[in-house]
Amino acid sequence: MPQLCYLHVYENQAIAMNLPTLLRSFGLIYIALLVGLMGCAKKGNTPQIPTDDPFFAKGADISWLTQMETSGKLFYDTNGTTSNLLPLLKGYGINTIRLRVWVNPSGGWNGQQDVIAKAQRAKAAGMRLLINFHYSDSWADPGQQTKPANWQNAPFNSLKDSLAAHTSQVLTALKTAGVSPHWVQIGNETNDGMLWPEGRASTQMANFAALINAGYQASKAVFPSAQVMVHLSNGYDSSLYRWMLDGLVANNAQFDLVGMSLYPSINDWSVKAEQCRSNMQMVVNRYNKPVMLVEIGMPWDAPEETRLFIADLIAKTKSLPANQGLGVMYWEPQAYNWQGYTLGCFDLSGKPTRAMLGFGDGNR
């Protein structure tokens, strides 16, 4: 609490004095007032720019990192000096890393050992961790939720057991490696469930809820304090979130928070950001769950618009009542000249653009 500076005024006390004495008294009061105000300034009571909340997640999904490095990609600061990616991101305010997990991926990228290696680097950099289970051998998103090849012919109960075993195995390996995630995401952009067709929400909502519970329980068994997330895309679409979350709640699904994705265009980002804020507020009010934007992105060659977008989303997320907005994460900001992806925050020479400044702008 700021220290207050003030003058005592004593009422109902008559002080008899002649005019010269009275003037001298007022002069002394004026000097005392100036000294008091100077004392307030010295004690730091002038308005200060708020410092950043260390518990608010400013994050980046950097799951491509090791594959990019192996292919020869380098990262540079704005002066063109070669830099390790994690310290470079940390300098912009990034305090959290998100990593996707695939079951049996081609080349091993995003498999268990690759995830552990990246997670250990995040821990060494002093960053928190979100582990994102796709439950597929490759990409899982609203258009594809393909079961891992080794799970293809399993009946539903065996599928559920395989999901739990995979979750437990990866998290236990992380624990053995000395890494403890703060958040665990069960499924990626599960707008219509996962592990199709058995876990497709539009036809088998009860099955999808059972899969969520299997992942939840497996996560809590290894890391009881980790918060378990369900994740949908299109963070502006409140009807999608009401349909899905109502269905999960009706089927007794267990989850601690809700993750969102948001990928607007440079022309509609402000509208989509406001719709997303309204949707986040709805989730907090209707389900009493905190929210986190775990994937955002805009074109790398529109850095000023992207900077404004990031800063605005951070401010909107922080504005939610009772600190129910937990964070904002950019998806693969370091990606440049890589697999055709154009929504990063680095330019074609491997240097961060002004877009990354949005993570600092969001502090105020």
Image (cartoon, rainbow, N blue to C red):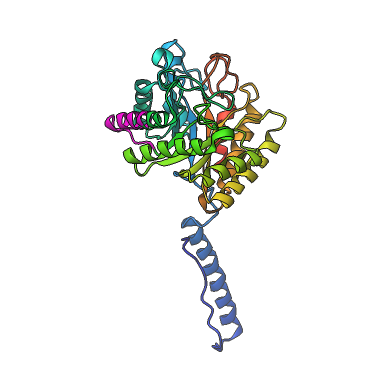
Q: Which residues are magenta?
A: 165-181
- In this rendering, the answer to whether 51 lies above or below 186 is below
- Above or below: residue 245 compared with residue 265: below
Q: Residue furthest right?
A: 267
Does residue 171 belong to the magenta stretch?
yes
Q: Position of residue 116 (x, y in %)?
A: 35, 25
If the image is split into quadrants, where does the C terminus sit? top right
Q: Kindly give the residue lying farthest to the front in the view shown.
A: 155
In this orientation, does residue 18 appear? yes
**Residue 19, quarter of the rendered image:** bottom right
In x, y percent, where is residue 124? 34, 30
Q: Position of residue 98 (x, y in %)?
A: 45, 30
Task: Compare residues 305 and 283 and report the one nearer the observer.
Answer: 283
Residue 183 visible in the current orientation: no
Q: Tell which residue pokes out farthest to the left in this image.
A: 176
Comparing 4 with 32, the one in front is: 4
Residue at 65 percent of width and 45 percent of height: 278
Residue 63 at what x, y percent from top left?
A: 45, 23
On the image, which quarter does residue 162 sit in? top left
In the displayed structure, would residue 334 be above or below residue 337? below
Q: Residue at x 38, y 33 (%)?
A: 164
